[in-house]
């Protein structure tokens, strides 16, 4: 019997804080549902734009990729490069190697002796490579 009394006291002690937490949770859930409703309404209004962007190859790259990466991808795609090596300068800050490799797919980075070399302006061409084209801050070279 004493345990039930303590249990009832404990429940009474925690009732108000638990109700406050529940009320705040419902407010948060309400805001989340409202945000979701607004996002869906916006998406429905702009559905034509969304569908065009979804079906357009490489859409959205201009908004998320640095200019250097965009220029490099343009060169790789223009010359239909299947495999390339890239300069060590791509690994320095400001030259995001991961974005380059992701965007260039299905072209793959290869070993140092790959048929094409992607470099950053200002560095010298590797031996046995000839410049194909420069674009922005990058260049593409053909290597033998």
Image: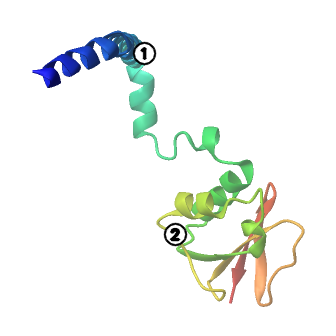
Taking 7 as reference, is 105 above or below it?
A: below
Residue at 80% across, 84% down: 126
- Mark carried by residue 107: 2
**The N terminus: image quadrant:** top left
Q: Would you identify the image quadrant in which residue 138 lies? A: bottom right
Element at badge 1? helix
Residue 130, given in percent of the width and then of the height, sits at 78, 80
For label 2, the crowd category at 10 Å Cα-Cα, with few meaning under 14, some 14 to 19 and many 20 or more, is: some
Identify the residue shown where x is 60% and y is 62%.
Answer: 98
Q: CA distance from mark 1 to mark 2?
A: 40 Å
Looking at the picture, how far across and down is residue 117, in whole percent?
70, 76
Would you place residue 68 above or below residue 132 in this image?
above
Residue identifier under label 1: 35
Residue situated furthest left in the rendering: 1
**Residue at image coords 53%, 60%:** 102
In the displayed orientation, state which residue is furthest to the front: 2
Q: Residue 3: in sight, yes or no?
A: yes
- The C terminus sits in image quarter: bottom right
Residue 78 visible to the viewer: no
Q: Is residue 27 left or right of residue 64?
A: left
Q: Is residue 116 above or below residue 74?
A: below
Q: Residue 63, percent across and down?
A: 62, 38
Instruction: Provide the secondary structure element on which disc 2 rests.
Output: loop
Q: Position of residue 78 (x, y in %)?
A: 61, 60
- Which colour style is shown? rainbow
The residue sitting at 66% across, 52% down in the picture is 70
């Amino acid at each position: 019997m004493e345990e039930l009394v303590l249990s009832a006291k404990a429940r009474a002690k925690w009732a108000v804080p638990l109700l406050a937490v529940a009320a705040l949770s419902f407010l948060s859930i309400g805001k989340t549902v409202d945000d979701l409703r607004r996002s869906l309404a916006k998406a429905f209004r702009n559905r034509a734009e969304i569908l065009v962007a979804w079906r357009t190859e490489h859409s959205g790259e201009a908004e998320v990729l640095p200019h250097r990466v965009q220029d490099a991808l343009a060169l790789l795609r223009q010359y239909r490069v299947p495999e390339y090596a890239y300069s060590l300068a791509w690994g320095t800050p400001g030259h995001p190697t991961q974005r380059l490799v992701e965007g260039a797919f299905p072209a793959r980075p290869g070993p140092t002796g790959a048929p094409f070399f992607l470099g950053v302006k200002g560095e010298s061409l590797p031996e046995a490579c000839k410049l194909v084209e420069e674009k922005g801050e990058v260049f593409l070279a053909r290597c033998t």
